[in-house]
Structures are given as C-alpha cells and as structure tokens.
Image (tube, rainbow, N blue to C red):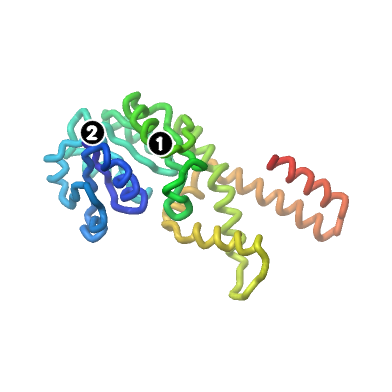
Amino acid sequence: MKILVLGAGKMGTFLTDVLCINHEVALFDTDPKRLRFVFNTLRMTEYEEIWAFEPELVINCVTLKYTIDAFEKVLPYLPKNCIISDIASVKTGIQAYYEGTGMRYVSTHPMFGPTFATLDNLSTQSAIIISESDHMGKAFFKDLYGSLKLRIFEYSFDEHDETIAYSLSIPFASTLVFASVMVPQEAPGTTFKRHMDIAKGLLSEDDYLLTEILFNPYTHNQVEKIRAELKTLLEIIDDKDTERMQDFLKMVRKNIE
C-alpha cells in the first residue's frame, strides 16, 4: 500500500519506521531538517510531491493543534479514493470534519507516547480504533496495531473522549498538581523519585497536547472528583481521625484491586 505520513515528529517517524518494511511510505514535513534520519522512505517537503505519489492512505501525525489544518492543506492533492486518518488523542470536532470532506476516513489513538513507552516491547500498551471509521481503514490499523502486540479497543468518537478523560486526564492532572508544589531540594524516597520521573516525562510532552487532553469536554468532572477526595483527605488529616483514615485507605485499596 502507498502510505503518506504527515509530520516527522516522534509518532510520525515511529510509524514510518514500522510501515516502511512492508509498504511504500512517504513522509511529509515542511521542515526538511526533520526528515534527515528516516530510511527506506520517500521524503517530501512540497505538496505537489503528494499529488505525484498518489497515496492510498494518509496518516496525519502532526501536532494536535494543527491536525485539521494539515488535512486542509493536503486534501487538494489526494486521490478521491484515498483514506484519510488521524491518531489524535482528543477527537472533539474531528468526526464533523471528516464527514464534511466526503472522503473515507479512519480515526485511531495509539495510547503510548515515544516519551514513555519502550518501543521494542509494546505488549503492555493499548490502541483505540474509532467504530465509525471506514471498514477497510479499521482492518488496516487492526493489523498494524496487532503486529505491534498492542491491546486493541474499539470505541465511538464520544466514548473515546470520555475514556481519555478518565485514563489520561486524571493522571495528568494529579501529576501536574504534584509538580506544582515542588521546590529545588533533594528528597529521598523511592515513591518520590518515581513520581518525579513521571512528572518530568509528562512535562517533556508538547504543551498543546497536554492542554487539549485537559480541555477534553469530559475532563472537568474527573478533576472535580479529585478535588472532592482531596477535600475529604484534608479533613481527615486535620481531624487526625484514625478511623476515617482507615476507612479511606480501605476504599482506595478496593478501587485498585
């Protein structure tokens, strides 16, 4: 299959490396410096090159902020039968855009970032495929993600964003609160170090990506739950109420069984 990958960032170059073994792959980026370290792949910086390539599938890997803008710029150069796809972590507005193009589409979300994941062993990682997607597009990504040993889930657009609010927004918000009260000092303890490593990894991600995940329409209610539990915990601490603390810990342990 002739596949065009948009954006030579972390995920774009990773998917290019994976796909170029069995497919004819082109990687497009307006910055030629970002194309220096790809192999067995056509490198493109001009839109006219896309027209000549005639891709059968486009995988949009640009920063979330520019996902739709990137589609807008390449659509005039794509064959009518081309399937367009995204890997965005927040799907708000994407379904309406796809339906407005009249083209076949497939939307997925590989739920691992090159910052955190061990890319040569992804068996503990997951991917979501959107149920409204084109049948052939879904089949392609099921094969791709299956070959990477990812756990595959299928959700609707709305179910995806609701799930992401739970699985990403809660840990992101908790980590940001942890990091926001840090001061420059040495602190012993394995738990502290692990939290700090997670915080550093999270804050190495793109600001707009973090912002969009936290601005997910479903995030507010999840963060509100965190605030409510923090309020309860603070009351227990202030009252030095051992019995309530034991009940609280029992409840927390049950939640993570």
User: In front here: 211 or 87?
Assistant: 87
Using the image, tell me which numbered label, if any, was put on residue 145: 1
The answer to which quarter of the image holds residue 33 is bottom left
Q: Looking at this rendering, what residue extends furthest in the top direction? A: 135
Q: Is residue 247 left or right of residue 178?
A: right
Q: Position of residue 118 (x, y in %)?
A: 46, 51
Query: How far is the residue under mark 1 from the one under mark 2?
Result: 16 Å
The answer to which quarter of the image holds residue 240 is bottom right
Q: Position of residue 12 (x, y in %)?
A: 32, 48
Q: Is residue 233 visible?
A: yes
* Three-letter amino acid code at the position of disc 2: Met
Which corner quadrant holds the N terminus? top left
Of labels 1 and 2, earlier in sequence is 2
* Three-letter amino acid code at the position of disc 1: Tyr
Residue 78, compared with residue 112, is above or below; it is: above
Q: Residues within 10 Å of mark 2 (few under 14, many from 20)?
A: few
Q: Is residue 217 visible?
A: no
Q: Position of residue 91 (x, y in %)?
A: 42, 39
**Helix, strand or loop status at disc 2:** loop
Using the image, tell me which numbered label, if any, was put on residue 1: 2
**Helix, strand or loop status at disc 1:** helix
Residue 108, compared with residue 43, is above or below; it is: above
